[in-house]
Image (cartoon, rainbow, N blue to C red):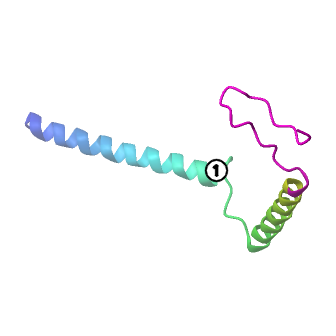
Amino acid sequence: MSSLAWMIVITLILTVLGTLVLAFITFKYYWGERGAPPPTREERRRRREEELRLRAKQIEHSRTHRWEKRSSDFFDNRKNDSDE
């Protein structure tokens, strides 16, 4: 075989080998020891309810703990006092 043919064969072999390695790593990551199948409908519903509960808690906290505005002076890093 000519050197061009050998280069093509080696390139094809390396391409197939790289594709197989990528597929193997992807499979192990998503469905292997570390990965898990997609959540069930009940699990998704439970997670959504938990997220909504935490969001409501954050909103309530932000209502009771208002932001303190800073001075418009660039070099004054202190927060403004409400009493002044």
The quadrant in which residue 80 appears is: top right
**Residue type for callout 1:** Gly
Q: Is residue 39 above or below residue 7?
A: below
Q: Quadrant of the C terminus?
A: top right
The residue at the point 18 percent across, 42 percent down is: 8
Magenta residues, start to end = 63-84
The residue at the point 59 percent across, 48 percent down is: 29
Q: Residue 16: x percent and y percent?
A: 34, 47
Q: Is residue 28 above or below residue 44?
A: above
Q: Does residue 23 appear left or right of residue 9 in this picture?
A: right
Q: Main secondary structure of the magenta part?
A: loop
Check residue 18 for magenta coloring.
Answer: no
Badge 1: few (under 14), some or many (20 or more) residues near its Cα, within 10 Å?
few
Q: Quadrant of the N terminus?
A: top left
Q: Residue 20: x percent and y percent?
A: 42, 48
Q: Residue 10: x percent and y percent?
A: 24, 38
Q: Nearer the viewer, residue 82 or 36?
A: 82
Check residue 73 for magenta coloring.
Answer: yes
Residue that numbered label 1 is attached to: 32
The residue at the point 79 percent across, 72 percent down is: 42
Q: Residue 72: x percent and y percent?
A: 69, 37
Secondary structure of residue under mark 1: loop
The quadrant in which residue 81 appears is: top right
Q: How many numbered discs sit on the rendered protein?
A: 1
Q: Does residue 41 appear left or right of residue 64 in this picture?
A: left
